[in-house]
Amino acid sequence: MADILNILLALTSIGFGLVGWLMPRYTMDVLDLEARGTTMGTSEIRAASGALFVGLGAGALILNTPLAFAMIGFAWGGAALGRLTSILADGAPTRQTYVFFAVEAAVAALALGLNLGMA
């Protein structure tokens, strides 16, 4: 069962990453971001919200080790930490902010629990 969940977590990372990488304007709309006259915004979305997560998921599938799948948890956990920091420090969080935090934290907890013997 853990093997199937690990594959699903990797595919989740790849799936979200593909959207950010190949559909940056859509991703920016969903995240309430806007370009400011240069391509840097779309470049950042393609890189940090896109291809980075494709590489993360693909790497875990290729290496196929518990530590590789645990790295998915560390990465998503870092995203959850950043999101929580925003909730606490930036003021006026939206429902979407809480939903994104919950998903990021859940993926992190599952990946780390499955692969570091915490489950």
Image: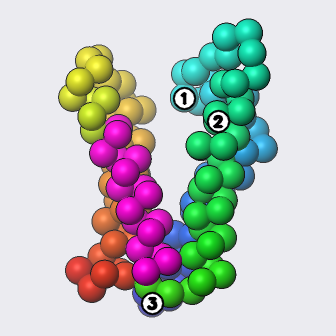
Q: Is residue 79 a member of the stretch shown in magenta?
A: yes
Residue under pointer 2: 45
Tell me the amino acid under the disc marked 3. Met
Q: Quadrant of the C terminus?
A: bottom left
Q: What secondary structure is marked by label 1?
A: loop
Q: Earlier in the sequence, mark 1 or mark 2?
A: 1
Which mark lies nearer to you, 1 or 2? 2
- The percent coordinates of residue 10 (x first, y second) are 57, 70
Residue under pointer 3: 1
- Residue 94's place in the image compared with 118, above or below, is above
Q: Main secondary structure of the magenta part?
A: helix
Q: Earlier in the sequence, mark 2 or mark 3?
A: 3
Tell me the amino acid under the disc marked 1. Leu
Q: Earlier in the sequence, mark 3 or mark 1?
A: 3
Q: Residue sitting at 29 percent across and 20 percent down?
A: 90
Residue under pointer 1: 31
Residue 17 shows in this picture: no
- Residue 75's place in the image compared with 80, above or below, is below
Q: Residue sitting at 37 percent across and 82 percent down?
A: 115
- Residue 9's place in the image compared with 35, above or below, is below
Quarter of the image where one finds residue 117: bottom left
Magenta-tinted stretch: 67-83
